[in-house]
Amino acid sequence: MGMRRWTARELIDLVLDPDSFEPWDEPVDISSHPPAYQDELRAAEEKAGTDESVLTGRGTVSGRPVAFIVNEFAFLAGSIGVAAAERISAAVRRATAEGIPVVASTSSGGTRMQEGTRAFVHMIEISRALMEHRASGLAYIVHLRHPTTGGVFASWGSLGHVTVAEPGALVGFLGPKVFEALNGRPFPEGVQTAENLAAKGVIDAVAAAEDLRWLLDQALAVVVDPQTVGHLERRTPLAPGTPGPPAWESITRTRAEGRVGVRDLLKYGAEGTLRLRGTDEGERDETVIVALTRLDGVPCVLVGQDHTRQSPETPMGPGALREARRAMRLASELRLPLVTVVDTPGAELSPKAEEGAIAGEIARCIATLVTMDVATVSVILGQGCGGGALALLPATTVIATEHAWLSPLPPEGASVIRYGSIDRAAEMAESQGVRALDLLAGGDVHVVVPEHDDDTPADLARAVAAEIAHHLRFW
């Protein structure tokens, strides 16, 4: 395929700080295997320069300790036998005991056929160790190299909090050669590629081995590093009873071209943002953004509705809310604060959305948010229309910008229901109390960030980020 095939030792040198790697591996005893298989193992060791298909140990990335598990493809196609599986499980359990993240870089054809079912079943032990690790609040980051197939992809290759794959890598459950032999026709091209799986929301991104150190640096800065002192300036929140502009003026402003959005919040109020794409279950919706980031120095998981990607042609569907629930799970598992950003003209209304469980996803988002065990802050940044907005609203602290609003339907829709036409939309918005200041008076919003007439998106984004960070800083 013309791509560089990195050896396990080359990757260790590429990713970890110089001279920081400390091997954890015990020698492998092959004496109980049949003589012919022992010969195969000795030949594999000579060819690969490693004693098994995986190397494990501890090292540092910019001084932060991690456990590193690396496949060596040259050793019997990186296949996982019992000894390799036990080596992986032991490394994960040691990392859990030491309280450090695990990074895995896979390159494997899957279970080692020479060892059969017993090796196959050992994939469960690897998965068990990894779930114990995740249950301890520790991160697991996966880098899939060419090729990663079979039992490796279907166990430890698919359990990461963050998962990336090499450009052009073959990544799949079924080896294409096996498919062709069994079915008499080739497996369709382009399906089992890193790029396709990223596009479909199975993995987060395509990242070359040369970029893995940078990516780990970004992720670990959020999941490991402490918060730092903020430098953004807060605005004095508006007091309850502040008169404010008419509801329709606010609605018009939030619908205008160039209105501040979640992208501005990340661009001007955050640093070290690492975007995660898709549900990791084969669904992806561009109308929401999920990211590990540091808002004014505070590490958090952020999920935000992106109004610039929502249109009548591309509405926010149930997949977007499943991505949002992935963000909620990440925050809970990694014990990070969760920030949600509400900014939607409304969720998708279509037969497809109904059959995709849009109502159920709204309900599940709300149910998950109200039972979160980490600090939560939600921000109504602009439009807050319908159940799609409600899905990301309930948080310990609810912040809104001065012109933000929240309503059960677009005001035009409410006018049609009430009066038979859209002509009284402004009147409906006023009477329904949709403004941030109305919500503040009723206790449904806790803080309203003032907006200035000369605000740029950058100005308002910084003020909102400062307010979010203020509420998260000492949680």
Image: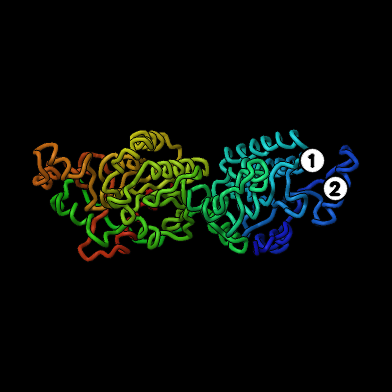
Residue occupying image coordinates x 29% and y 52%: 311
Identify which residue, 40 or 50, lies in the foreground: 40
The quarter in which the C terminus is drawn is top left
Q: Residue furthest front?
A: 184
Residue 455, compared with residue 185, is above or below; it is below
Mark 2 crowdedness (10 Å alpha carbons): few <14, some 14-19, many ≥20: some
Q: Is residue 98 visible?
A: no
Q: Name the spot of residue 392 as percent of width and height, x first.
A: 35, 42
Quarter holding residue 364: top left
Mark 1 crowdedness (10 Å alpha carbons): few <14, some 14-19, many ≥20: few
Q: Name the spot of residue 275 as percent of width and height, x first.
A: 47, 55
For disc 1, the marked residue is: 114
Identify which residue, 90 or 159, lies in the foreground: 159
Identify which residue, 147 or 472, lies in the foreground: 147
Residue occupying image coordinates x 31% and y 43%: 348
Identify which residue, 388 or 341, lies in the foreground: 388
Q: Which of marks 1 and 2 is nearer the N terminus?
A: 2
Mark 1 touches mark 2? (CB < 8 Å):
yes
| Label drawn at residue 398 | none
Circle 1 sits in a helix, a strand or a loop, which is it? helix
Circle 2 sits in a helix, a strand or a loop, which is it? helix
Residue occupying image coordinates x 42% and y 45%: 338
Quarter holding residue 377: top left
Q: Name the spot of residue 47 as percent of width and height, x first.
A: 82, 57
Residue occupying image coordinates x 73% and y 46%: 79
Q: Name the spot of residue 312 as percent of width and height, x first.
A: 27, 50
The quarter in which the N terminus is drawn is bottom right
Q: Is residue 151 left or right of residue 296?
A: right
At label 1, which amino acid type do we have?
Gln
For disc 2, the marked residue is: 40
At label 2, which amino acid type do we have?
Glu
Real-space Cα distance between discs 1 and 2? Answer: 10 Å
